[in-house]
Image (cartoon, grey):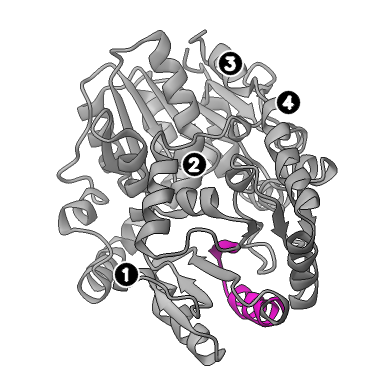
Amino acid sequence: MTSSFTPNTNEILSLWAYTLLLSILLPFVFLHFCFQYFTKKTTSPGARIQRFGVNLRTAETGGLLFHCVSVGEVVAAANVINAIRQLHPSIPVTITTTTATGAKQVTSLFKDTVTHCYLPLDLPWMMSRLLKQAAPAHVIITEVELWPNMIDQCWRKGVPVSVINARMTSNSMRSYAKISALFNPMLHKLYKICAQGERDFKNYQQLRTPKQTLLLTNNIKFEQTVLPDVHQLASEFAQMFNIAGRAIVVAGSSHAPEESVLLEAHKTVLQQYPKTLLIIVPRHPQRFDEVYQICQSSGLRCMRSSDQIPCDENTQILLVDEMGKLQALYALATIAFVGGSIADRGGHNALEPAAFAVPILMGPYRYNNPAICQVLRDGGALFEVNNAQQVSCNVLQWLDDDASRTRAGQAGKQVLQENSGAVYATLEALGFS
């Protein structure tokens, strides 16, 4: 299943140069990780040390090793992992992530039925140690993060590597084209690339991906994984914070300056619907304190979920400064704003609120998942907003008209149902069907 590709001298030297550069940077990376741990306590020391190929945890040998960058990739991979396990219930699965939030999502979705490990840095000896310990039958990368030494070590050891739900933006394509001596060998060492959309398929073609490697399987995120106990979690959250029955606008995965835009819009909404609650869920934990200060300076009444204090009827903003709550909050939402879209971050996963029949607002920056967003927009589930005035206008329109809001929400759920099938196509491409 592995390629018989032979790299040329220039490609070999490019990989050596890349490895040398990483090796030179390694001491500084180690100091940075130490600083992050001691100042922010973002992960445990055991987890940090895994990034250096030490204290690795893997499932039994001969299984599957999935690599997912963070939360979104874990959610996407879950669809495929669950489908494979229906066919092969006893297959061992190891999931690697690069972020702590991704690790928490693995635990949330799978509990102890898979083994989690942080992906080591992309140095040959670290990747070799991971592969030797896990001895996977197949390495499966979700969406992005093609690491040269990871793929090279798999190729040398005869371990097939595939990319599922593969995403390749035009910007990424141009960047990779500039380092073709380093990037092109990876394409020839891969077993399968399952593109998530027509844009991604064509961009991989532009990078001269071998024809037998590249397939268009469509986006597995359309088969959105919903936590089995999400409605119970939502009910418990609503009860804990005394917000049941209120109109709720959830701003999920927000970035600066989106919070300021939403707060300005919320002031307008409150003039007509004073009991409406804005729930803000920042994308990055390190911004929790910053966002709280922004909320306080707005003059609106704000509470933090980590304080575990119920809201009263005068609470206007609830800042959720905890991880792993977003799905439950979308289940509670009346209206959802999906972040990273007014901020130029490409937009986060609009299918999460769609799964709960919640109408969606997003800004103009949706290039991370353009096909998904376009289908949702064409179906009447997603509406574009560029500023506070447009946000408040859409929110007020939906609060004024329950039927219109319900139609928009149901349109999103219908899109999910009509675009199923990508998981089966992916399994077939990987040889699991």
Classify 321 as above or below 148. below
Crowding at dot 4, Cα within 10 Å, few <14 / some 14-19 / many 20+, comes out as: few
Crowding at dot 3, Cα within 10 Å, few <14 / some 14-19 / many 20+, comes out as: some
Q: Which mark is residue 424?
A: 3
The kind of secondary structure element at disc 3 is helix
Taking depth in this image into account, of 170 and 350 the one nearest to the observer is 350
- Residue drawn at x 62%, y 43% as measured from the top left: 351
Measure the alpha-carbon separation of dots 3 and 1.
40 Å
Q: Which residue is mark 1?
A: 306
- Answer whether residue 252 is magenta in the image: yes
Image side of residue 330 versus residue 406, left or right: left
Q: Which residues are magenta?
A: 248-269
Image side of residue 402 versus residue 280, left or right: right
Tell us which disc is closer to us: 4 or 2: 4
Q: Position of residue 253 (x, y in %)?
A: 53, 61
Q: Which residue is mark 4?
A: 418
Measure the alpha-carbon separation of dots 3 and 2.
18 Å
- Residue drawn at x 66%, y 69% as measured from the top left: 343
- Label whose residue precedes the other's in the sequence (3 or 4): 4
- Label whose residue precedes the other's in the sequence (2 or 1): 2
The kind of secondary structure element at disc 4 is helix
